């Protein structure tokens, strides 16, 4: 049962986050405004670059708002029953395009299971995208990202593995905290969001990392 104190803590965390999200969203908005103003004085030859930046910044603002809303969500809506591996497979073209742009390789490995589990497929996709993007952002152009879906007698497992620089031991707990980021343009909301999605699906997120070798994030969903 959720105690009054937990409830208050949660509200205060959401309040702090709202303040931070406001700040984070203002930045891309300011960039969009500035670029649109500059665009007035430009010739069509320059448009491509300006459109690109404006779209990128709008996506960034939308991403922050989406992450924040998902993070603030408490009610699980697991009314769909779908196969984890098939849902992950649907994301591959999107991830592949991203990997291609970075010169990285991407591999999906499944053990052939297509057994369904209760889920909110939109959230599961967000989970896979966030973990994969973290992996890609951590790696250079020699990077190899492997997404695995496995099932066992009592669980379904999603594993996202990279051969990036890894996370130092003393940071492993920290990276799960809201707003902890080592990226210039990071929000630090990705992992807390993923942990929340895992939890709402009766799952658990664990991070294993070896500096210099890579990182593996596992989400294990208990069978119901
Ligand atoms: P963001 O991606 O916006 O920084 P996240 O919550 O997704 O926020 O991640 C928090 C931090 O955890 C990242 O800034 C990075 O330092 C670290 N991190 C997450 N995933 C990885 C990974 N696969 N390899 C190395 N570091 C990672
Ligand atoms: Mg992230």
Image: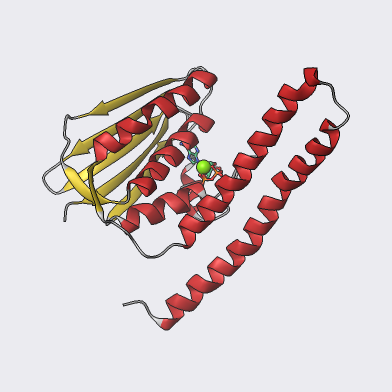
**Residue 187 in view in this figure:** no
Residue at 72 percent across and 52 percent down: it is 26
Q: Which image quarter is the N terminus in? A: bottom left
Q: Is residue 12 above or below residue 141?
A: below
Residue 33 relative to residue 132: left or right: right
Rendered location of residue 106, percent (x, y) = 39, 22
Rendered location of residue 167, percent (x, y) = 48, 39
Tell me, what colour scheme is on the image?
secondary structure
Residue 207 relative to residue 86: left or right: right
**Residue 91 in view in this figure:** yes
Residue at 53 percent across and 23 percent down: it is 140
Q: How many marks?
A: 0
- Residue farthest to the right, as pictured: 41
Q: Nearer the viewer, residue 82 or 99?
A: 82
Q: Is residue 167 above or below residue 69?
A: above
Residue at 30 percent across and 37 percent down: it is 87
Q: Nearer the viewer, residue 162 or 212?
A: 162
Tell me which corner region of the image, top left, top right, bottom left or bottom right, holds residue 76: bottom left
Rendered location of residue 42, percent (x, y) = 85, 25
- Residue farthest to the bottom, as pictured: 4
Q: Which image quarter is the C terminus in? A: bottom left
Q: Is residue 198 above or below residue 82?
A: below
Residue 78 relative to residue 55: left or right: left
Tell me which corner region of the image, top left, top right, bottom left or bottom right, holds residue 40: top right
Rendered location of residue 146, percent (x, y) = 35, 27
Residue at 70 percent across and 32 percent down: it is 53
């Amino acid at each position: 049962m959720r105690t009054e104190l937990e409830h208050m803590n949660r509200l205060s965390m959401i309040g702090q986050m709202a303040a931070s999200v406001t700040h984070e969203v203002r930045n891309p908005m300011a960039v969009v405004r500035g670029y649109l103003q500059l665009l007035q004085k430009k010739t069509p030859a320059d448009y491509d670059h300006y459109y690109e930046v404006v779209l990128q910044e709008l996506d960034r603002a939308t991403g922050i708002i989406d992450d924040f809303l998902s993070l603030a969500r408490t009610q699980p809506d697991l009314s769909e029953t779908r196969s984890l591996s098939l849902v992950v497979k649907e994301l591959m073209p999107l991830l592949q395009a991203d990997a291609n742009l970075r010169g990285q390789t991407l591999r999906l490995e499944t053990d052939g299971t297509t057994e369904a589990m209760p889920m909110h497929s939109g959230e599961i996709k967000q989970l896979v995208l966030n973990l994969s993007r973290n992996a890609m952002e951590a790696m250079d152009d020699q990077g190899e990202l492997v997404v695995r879906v496995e099932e066992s007698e009592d669980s379904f497992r999603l594993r996202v593995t990279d051969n990036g620089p890894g996370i130092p031991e003393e940071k492993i707990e920290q990276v799960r905290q809201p707003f902890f980021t080592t990226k210039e343009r990071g929000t630090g909301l990705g992992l807390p969001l993923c942990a929340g999605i895992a939890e709402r699906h009766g799952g658990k997120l664990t991070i294993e990392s070896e500096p210099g070798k890579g990182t593996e994030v596992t989400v294990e969903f208990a069978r119901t």
